[in-house]
Amino acid sequence: MSELPFLSLREVNARHADELKAAAARVIDSGWYVLGEEVAAFEREFAAYCGVRHAIGVGNGLDALTLILRGYLGLGVLAEGDEVIVPGNTFIASFLAISENRLVPVPVEPDPADFNLDPARVAQAIGPRTRAIMAVHLYGQLADMRALATLAERHRLLLIEDAAQAHGASSRGRCAGAWGHAAGFSFFPGKNLGALGDAGMVVTDDEALARRIAALRNYGSAEKYHHLFQGINSRLDEMQAALLRVKLKYLDEDLAWRRRIARRYREGIRHPWIRLPEVREEEQHAWHLFVLRCPRRDALQQHLLAHGIHCQVHYPVPPHRQPAYAGGLAPDLPLTEQLHREVLSLPIGPILRDEDADRVIAACQSFECPA
Ligand SMILES: *Cc1c(COP(=O)(O)O)cnc(C)c1O
């Protein structure tokens, strides 16, 4: 029996090996490695892809989110101690970006149907110190951005998107990243648009914010040796930008393939103990992860592994239960904690073949739930 890996990045990138090597050679031969033409071109191309005016390349997805909040602090839109509403069931980076800036993450229970922020619960969580909502398009599905934008407008809140898992997700032609005041993307190698190292991007239509972040990522400097702000060093480098320009060309093709695999899973898996992910609109979902729920999750994972199928759990422990936030947040989030006990991510990606998907389906169907 052959092993089916969760995701083989080697195979993902091997499809474009010649083009990637040519892009790398172009950078090597250029003699210019940080903040040059490749980054500027990728920023233009990614802004156009998302349908926004500005894109600022940064070192990784966490820094993209951190710099958005830091930019708004500097502009006086946010102040230390302000509260930011965030889904309880996200990757810890969403929380870290908030607390790193001495803002207060206020975790809210998700809608278990689509794993994303539930606008009704967000409305309940808005208090006198609330200044922003950070929506996370978890697993690649857009949060309910229409409802969240309405709420944000009514309460004069910033709406920020953690779009690290949602490159290319869209609703009625509007892409992830084009819904909020600003959005952070990650190009970590395993994401739908993945670099061959760390990389990230801020996108926004807010020109003042864009200018500030372009300086903040580069020691607070827009002009060499002239420092407007106490910035950091978090730049997207020329090599990653050149490689990402190659991969951006294939993103839509890859998304179409992910949707095909997801449809196959959703049509093929019919099991009393397995709850399939719900989809609000087909094109909303970029299917970064295909996450099902099962009350006997660990037994199902073991069963699939016995069939050579490698799954993962996103995520085993929610941020508010991590030692990093011990004593700090500790709200009661029973729904979030239940999701973390039940979720399982099946293999999905642009290289998974139909017959691989069928094998996963058959293995799920043969799962006999232990008593
Ligand atoms: C990956 C990810 C991040 C962080 O991106 P990095 O590039 O790894 O720093 C942030 N938020 C979510 C939801 C992610 O999945």
Image (cartoon, rainbow, N blue to C red):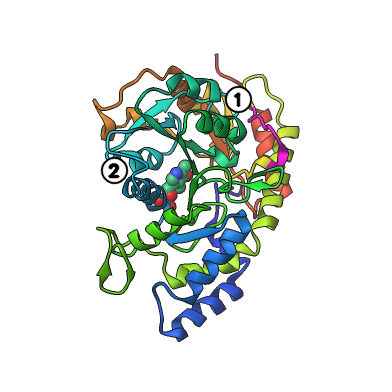
Let me know if residue 282 is in the magenta part.
yes
- Residue linked to disc 1: 113
Q: Which residue is mark 2?
A: 100
The answer, for residue 160, to whether it is visible in the render is yes
**Tags 2 and 1 touching, CB below 8 Å:** no
Which secondary structure lies at badge 1? loop
Residue that appears at 59% across and 65% down: 45
Separation of residues labelled 2 and 1 (CA atoms)? 31 Å
Please provide percent x and percent y for residue 167.
58, 50
Amino acid tagged 1 = Ala
SS for dot 2: helix
Relative vertical location of residue 139 with respect to residue 337 in this rendering, above or below: below
Residue 114 or 51: which is nearer the viewer? 51
Is label 1's Cβ within 8 Å of ligand 1? no
Q: Which residues are magenta?
A: 276-283
Tag in front: 2 or 1: 2
Q: What is the residue that sits farthest to the top in this orientation?
A: 371
Q: Amino acid at mark 2?
A: Glu
Name the residue nearer the viewer: 192 or 129: 129
Nearest the eye: 238 or 129: 129
Q: Is residue 244 visible?
A: no
For residue 320, the mark is none
